[in-house]
Amino acid sequence: MPAPETIRAYLDDLSDALGFDSALCCRVRAEVEDHLHEAVADGAPERDAVTRFGPVRDIAAQFAEASLTVQTKTAGITLLLGILGVYFAMRGRVAWWGVSDALRHSLIAAAFVPVMRVAFWVALLAGLLCWAFANRIPGARCELRKSLFWVVLLGAGATVASVVGVATDIVLVGVRISATAWTASTLLPGVMVTGEILLSAFLVRECWVLAYRVSAGSRLIDARSGASRDGGPGFR
Amino acid sequence: MEGEILKGHLDMIVLAALGSGPAHGYAAIETIRKTSQGALNLPEGTIYPALHRLEASGLLSSHWEQSPAGRRRRVYALTRKGVKALADQRTTWEQFSHAIAALLGASAHASP
């Protein structure tokens, strides 16, 4: 790909490279645009200004590294809080509702309660590991790639386990509600289950967005590593 | 100056450039270039990811401003944590450079 020679072309290439993260892309574009126009106002030809700024893919990879490091940390703590939110919603409902005979004697409950418990502990353990990995992401590029992979993998594991836990909980609440007459006290557990579902949906979305950004960002970082190894443009 | 040497000290260089007050990226690069009399001629684009990284670490804060030309520009400033980090790095650097200078001076005298 030929190097861009005008500010507009450079910004368009940079936006394309950072397109996986619209907020980052928007901020970087505005900052770089101001920088390049300042350079031109100081007397540099456009081509020199963009050349001095550095190769697009190289600069984009550096932004991706900085941004993904922060985003994985945020995702780690968000995931953990989400899982704890689901847990407290479940405990709150049990405390409010108590354990009914309908559940005590139900075969479905006998099968689903252990699944729900295991799913919750798996989600919590994976979430804690994800958070721990996200908080010790190293600066070295090869280590960064490895850590990002583990954060996404553990985050996905925690999210899937959390969704399984919520799904089993929905079944258990269904069993309980089917054996209970509808009253005002049925409403609060219903609201709590809805909260669990919304939290789970939020976790799935967060995990998906993180996986997408890490995947796209890693491609940039890999390309930069390759260019540096080959003696191409890079911060040598 | 060699890129690898600069890379190792990029964060300190950026913090030092903002030591005299808030600035946008271009102004910080100009400060680095002028203060070092051209010795620290960094690829300009590498400063911005460093600014983002230092902001995420809590060493810098930033906000948008309008440039005289009407464009949006991000202005960065040291936070209290950033001021302390710069002071710590300055002390470390002074100790390091004195030690290296002494070592190089001694080896120069010992050379035939």
Image (tube, coloured by chain):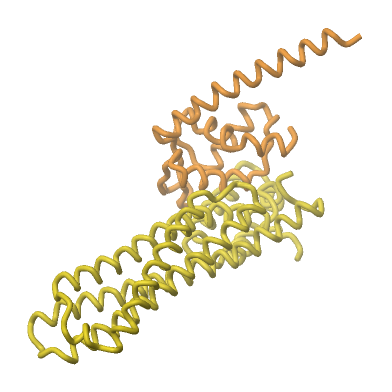
Chain colours: A yellow, B orange
Vertical side of A27 occupied by A169: above or below: below
Taking the spot 44% from the left edge, 30% from the top edge, the residue there is B83
Q: Residue lying furthest left in this view?
A: A184
Vertical side of B5 occupied by B67: above or below: below
Q: In front: A145, or B64?
A: A145
Quadrant that contains the C terminus of chain B: top right
Taking the spot 54% from the left edge, 38% from the top edge, the residue there is B27
Q: In front: A50, or B101?
A: B101
Vertical side of B55 occupied by A207: above or below: below
Name the side, left or right, on which B88 lies relative to A89: right
Tell how many labels: 0
Name the side, left or right, on which A8 lies relative to A96: right
Quadrant that contains the N terminus of chain B: top right
Name the side, left or right, on which B9 lies relative to A152: right
In percent of width and height, residue B107 lies at 81, 13
Name the side, left or right, on which B63 lies relative to A72: left
In percent of width and height, residue A231 lies at 81, 51
Q: Residue lying furthest right in this view?
A: B112
Q: In which quadrant of the rendered view does residue A91 lie?
A: bottom left
In percent of width and height, residue A110 lies at 30, 83
Taking the spot 49% from the left edge, 66% from the top edge, the residue there is A210
Q: In front: B6, or A137?
A: A137
In percent of width and height, residue A82 lies at 34, 65
Vertical side of B83 occupied by B59: above or below: below
Taking the spot 49% from the left edge, 54% from the top edge, the residue there is A134
Q: In which quadrant of the rendered view does residue A18 lie?
A: bottom right
